[in-house]
Image (tube, rainbow, N blue to C red):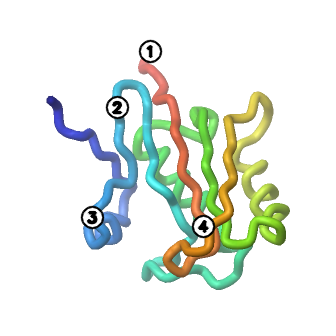
Amino acid sequence: MTKRDAIFPAGRQALYEINRYSAAIRSGDLLFVSGQVGSREDGSPEPVFEKQVQLAFDNLAAVLKAAGCTFDDVVDVTTFHTDPATQFEAVNTVRMKAIGEQPYPNWTAVGVNWLAGFDFEIKVIARIPQSI
């Protein structure tokens, strides 16, 4: 059995080490990205919700980039919301800028009551592009 092929973006290794998880795991041509949140440089939650969502997408983009992917390679999205009814519009605005045009990836939105001090989290599965 082979070891996990972990992917880490530059500059966030301490966060992953403290919490003992990988930013993403490559398995064949698939990339399974752990939930990304809108954390500031010190790891604390960004208090302004819209900025927290943007930071979560920025952190996700950094993980995708570290694996040679972009949002165009994302095939499945799961988002977690502490108050989906009031947060949907803000999340969808950022999501549509990141995801772009059709065809869109799958998307499952889940309402939760705890995200370790955050109000939004996003995790994805992406297909890693083949080198030519």
Circle 3: residue type: Arg
Q: Residue furthest left?
A: 1
Residue 60: x percent and y percent? 53, 54
- On screen, residue 90 versus residue 2, left or right, reads right
User: At numbered mark 1, what does the secondary structure look like: helix, strand or loop?
Assistant: loop
Residue 106: x percent and y percent? 68, 36
Q: Residue 27 carries which label?
A: 2
Whole-number angstrom distance, CA of label 4 to CA of label 2: 26 Å
Q: Which mark is residue 20?
A: 3
Give the mark count.
4
Say above or below: 19 vs 5: below
Residue under the image location 84 percent in, 62 percent down: 89
Circle 2: residue type: Ser
Q: Residue 55 carries which label?
A: 4
Badge 1: residue crowd in 10 Å (few <14, some 14–19, many ≥20):
few
Residue 27: x percent and y percent? 34, 31
Circle 1: residue type: Ile
Residue to which mark 1 is pinned: 132
- On screen, residue 120 versus residue 21, left or right, reads right
Please state, as top left, top right, bottom left or bottom right, where the N terminus lies in the image: top left
Whole-number angstrom distance, CA of label 3 to CA of label 2: 19 Å
- On screen, residue 65 versus residue 80, left or right, reads left
* Sooner in the amino-acid sequence: mark 3 or mark 2: 3
* Sooner in the amino-acid sequence: mark 1 or mark 3: 3
Residue under the image location 62 percent in, 67 percent down: 112
* Sooner in the amino-acid sequence: mark 1 or mark 2: 2
Mark 1 near mark 2, Cβ–Cβ under 8 Å? no
Circle 4: residue type: Leu
Say above or below: 113 vs 72: below
